[in-house]
């Protein structure tokens, strides 16, 4: 299994508070991704990173920011949490962003369950 | 834009029954296609993949064939087990440079009863 951990695994917070989720990898993979999973929507990409300090927006980026100061860590921040951000958040990594053998395969972390009251 | 449509669940089967979960996609060019599985309380795991037309991905008794002519990637298994109970996601990754995003279907929950 790919070495991906997420912290915290569960969090309850109140509307308007800031929240930071952490993804840590031990695979030295270049690409990292944040997804959210909601019933009836599957998984949707929030932000991704293609290197240290290189990030870009995904499909549902509004209300979220990310940072990547080290290869192994990718942080997702909700500046002011809202109830619509209650979800399960998954981090994923891939060795490459290109179609090349197994390099494009994304490996997922165990997820963080966030409840915003 | 790109999209993935998979059959609505939940699907309930008896042990040793045959499984087919339909998946069709809309995308330009030749995307890569994936099936991921999510067991209760866990993250997603890659089950199988195919990167070009007529490729067959297989793993743990599951198979799926990349059909360009019907834009489909149906998941099949000849004899399911209780341990196969999970949510299955079909996904695509567009072809071309800069195509980092996986587009997922909504998932199909499979329950296998003894």
Image (spheres, coloured by chain):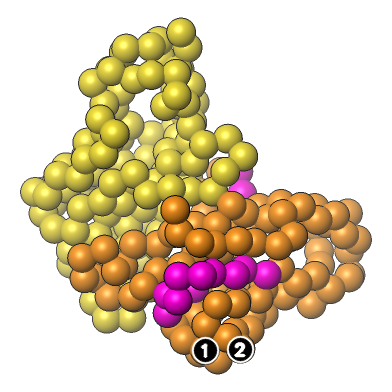
Chain colours: A orange, B yellow
Q: Mark 1, chain letter?
A: A
Q: Is residue A105 left or right of residue A63?
A: left
Image position of B70 (left or right of A84): left
Which span is picked out in magenta?
A22-39
Q: Secondary structure at mark 1?
A: loop
Foreground pick, A14 / A93:
A93
Pointer 1: what residue?
A52
Is residue B30 left or right of B93 when viewed as pictured? left
Query: Are there few (<14), some (14-19), or many (20+) residues within 10 Å of tag 1?
Result: some
Q: Which residue is mark 2?
A: A69
Position in image of residue A30 (x %, y %): 42, 79
Residue B48 visible in the displayed image: yes
- Quarter of the image with the C terminus of chain A is bottom right
Which residue is the extreme one toward the bottom?
A: A53
Secondary structure mainly formed by the magenta segment:
strand
Q: Chain of mark 2?
A: A
C-beta proximity under 8 Å, tags 2 and 1:
yes
Q: Is residue A56 visible?
A: no
């Amino acid at each position: 299994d790919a070495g991906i951990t997420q912290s915290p695994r569960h969090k309850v917070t109140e509307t308007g508070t800031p929240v930071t989720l952490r993804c840590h990898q031990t695979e030295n993979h270049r690409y990292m991704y944040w997804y959210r999973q909601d019933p009836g929507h599957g998984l949707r990409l929030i932000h991704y990173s293609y290197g240290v300090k290189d990030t870009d927006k995904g499909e549902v980026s509004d209300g979220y920011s990310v940072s990547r100061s080290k290869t192994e860590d990718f942080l997702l921040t909700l500046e002011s949490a809202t109830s619509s951000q209650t979800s399960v958040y998954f981090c994923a990594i891939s060795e490459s962003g290109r179609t090349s053998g197994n390099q494009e395969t994304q490996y997922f972390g165990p997820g963080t369950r966030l409840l915003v009251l | 834009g790109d999209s993935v449509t998979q059959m609505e669940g939940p699907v309930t089967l008896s042990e040793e029954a045959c499984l087919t979960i339909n998946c069709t996609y809309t995308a330009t060019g030749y995307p890569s296609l994936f099936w991921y599985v999510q067991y209760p309380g866990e993250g997603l795991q890659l089950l199988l993949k195919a990167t070009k037309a007529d490729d067959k991905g297989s793993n743990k008794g599951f198979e799926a064939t990349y059909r360009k002519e019907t834009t489909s990637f149906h998941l099949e298994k000849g004899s399911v087990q209780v341990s196969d109970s999970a949510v299955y996601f079909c996904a695509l990754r567009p072809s071309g440079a800069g195509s980092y995003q996986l587009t997922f279907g909504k998932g199909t929950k499979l329950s296998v009863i003894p």
